[in-house]
Image (tube, grey):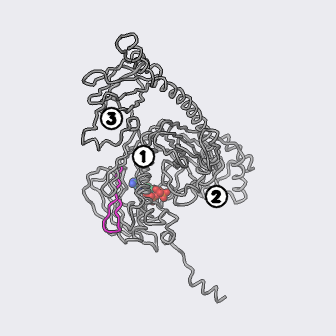
Amino acid sequence: MVIAEDLAKQQRSISVAEFFEKNKHLLGFDSPTRGIITTVKEAVDNALDACEEAEVLPDIFVAIRKTNSDVYRITVEDNGPGIVPKNVPYVFGKLLYGSRFHQIRQSRGQQGIGISAAVLYAQLTTGVPALVISRTGADVRAHRFELMIKTETNEPDILVDEEIDWDRTHGTRIEIEFKSTLAAKKKLLEYLRYTAVVNPHARITADIDGEITVFERVSSEVPPCPKAILPHPHGIEFGALKRIAATNSDTLDEFLVNCFSRVGRKTADEILGLAQIKPRRKAKTLDSDELKRLLEAMQQVKIPAPPAQQCLSPISEDLIRKGLEKEVQLDFIKARTRPSAVFSGHSFIIEAAIGYGGKLPAEGSAQILRFANRVPLLYQQGACAITNCISQVNWKSYGLSQQGLPVGPALIMVHVASTNVPFTSESKDAIASIPEIEREIILVLQELGRELKAYINRRDRNKLQDDRARAICSIIPEIARKVSDIVELPLVDTSPIEGKIMRKLVAKKRTCDGKVSIDVHNYTARELVFTLYNLSRDSASDAVPKPDFVDDFDGEYNKVWKCRLEPGTVWQVTYSGTGDGSIDLRGVEDNVKVVVDLDV
Ligand SMILES: Nc1ncnc2c1ncn2[C@@H]1O[C@H](COP(=O)(O)OP(=O)(O)OP(=O)(O)O)[C@@H](O)[C@H]1O
């Protein structure tokens, strides 16, 4: 008894801010190095969400600057709709305050913790308040706040609230300072790079300790903002049903039609018939037993899936491909968007892509890129359902080696878009193992695996043909020379014959100024204008990254390419199109060949 009384003296409630102050690892603040990434991620996710809601093309600026030996200032600025001044202190100074928790639609933020957790972490490690500037389209001037969180009460502490001039007409800027390191700079850039891949409509400019990187947008179309839908009867639980019924004064049939998605009059009647409850009863009059019967009937009646096209925003196969191709050089890429599916009444869509070859490392496990609601997942790869599904697929039958994960020069990207992404924890690092989601992931990976296999087979066949053609072509000039000696006629240009055998266009330096016209009448080629300068005697040549033309070729034509040309080098250029063109080989050594690989 005495012990119980002693304990009673110590028992008191804990504020959510106090809880997370002690358990910051749950929110992704397990180390100062990771703290920087989590802060940038939370602020950039918010910026993208806000721009999507306002239907503006995101222009996001991220800066990380060292302020003294171990303190960094993190700034994220967006051109979103801004935040109304009276709400700013709550958004940044109160945990579990947000606009998305109660909405059933795809969004990056869900819980209303993200950015305030970063403010909490800053005040914990440096005690420096967060600085926020925000301006809505309706504000004449911007508002500037300096904020902290009162941990005991989880309420904002406003240190400064003033109006200032700001060059943006609308948007938000947050600056947070804490002790950290830039040890995770590579990972941070990776996060921004892959954020750009799955948000192809966003431009992100990063200034990391003075080093500027711009992730340019590849699409100028703002994706439609997913619309919130009503809860689906198959996704509701007893507590939630009791809560919404308790305050609803509609009759039960109206309650079911008005408060749930995909329930019409007929379905409502069927549910109520099965539950044996009169349709004209008021929803708020049901007792616990009746609510349980209603819930059971709601689960049993067949109801169409939630309207996924309204509440989800998949990236699309075309934009996934474009986004990945912009960031990684690949020989093969295929993307797939699956039809929508449902788990526990929540819609979801799985999208995936497989890339192969190019600059991907030939050794080691394939590169895995995981995304949830257009956000890259960087940590806890091993604990994620996506990784688990990738290991379950038999990659050997698709042309890759496998040691758990597939091995080889491959990249596997999976995006889970859902109205409720089932994360394993609040730090939103890994997706929980949900059978419906796993099934869809495996199906899409198998579909892509078959495409990869077809590509690898085709490539191997082509390589064999190429090797044979090359062997034959290597002796043709010699044969031509010998024949010309024997028949005592001028040496003929064997390029067209070599080209025919290799199914390539072969151009050699012919005229004295080095300009070579290419006869393309056999092919449908266009804009074949590559200007190659021999920079081998040019001191500026050091600026040329490497003598590998194909790797640097980004599909742009009519461009002056500067490559170091060594005698004997064979440049291969793959392109497709129609028309005529020429290759300017001024200054190129005589024995340099340009091989144009026609994609006909
Ligand atoms: N840059 C911004 N522009 C406009 N509104 C914002 C911005 N940042 C935050 N908000 C608003 O503040 C709310 C709280 O943001 P916070 O990061 O704390 O949580 P969240 O993004 O909703 O969820 P999560 O905890 O899952 O990240 C958001 O729901 C949004 O309404």
| Camera-side residue of 114 and 89 | 114
Asked if one can make out residue 54 in the rendered structure from this viewpoint, the answer is yes
Where is residue 542, by image quadrant?
A: top left
Considering the image in quadrants, where does the N terminus appear?
bottom right
Q: Earlier in the sequence, mark 3 or mark 2?
A: 2
> Which dot marks residue 196?
1
Residue receiving disc 2? 242
Q: Position of residue 479 (x, y in %)?
A: 43, 18
Magenta residues span: 60-74
Q: Earlier in the sequence, mark 2 or mark 1?
A: 1
In whole angstroms, how far apart are the C-alphas of marks 3 and 2?
76 Å
> Which dot marks residue 565?
3
Where is residue 221, by image quadrant?
A: top left
In whole angstroms, how far apart are the C-alphas of marks 1 and 3?
35 Å
Q: Is residue 232 left or right of residue 111?
A: right
Amino acid at circle 1: Ala
- Decide: few, some or many residues near mark 2? Use Cα within 10 Å; few <14, some 14-19, many ≥20: some
Q: Is residue 215 above or below residue 165?
A: above
In the image, farthest residue toward the front: 486
Where is residue 240, by image quadrant?
A: bottom right
As for residue 72 lying within the magenta part, the answer is yes
- Decide: few, some or many residues near mark 3? Use Cα within 10 Å; few <14, some 14-19, many ≥20: many
In whole angstroms, how far apart are the C-alphas of marks 2 and 1?
42 Å
Q: Secondary structure at mark 2?
A: helix
Q: Secondary structure at mark 3?
A: loop
Callouts 3 and 2 close, C-beta under 8 Å: no
Q: Secondary structure at mark 1?
A: helix
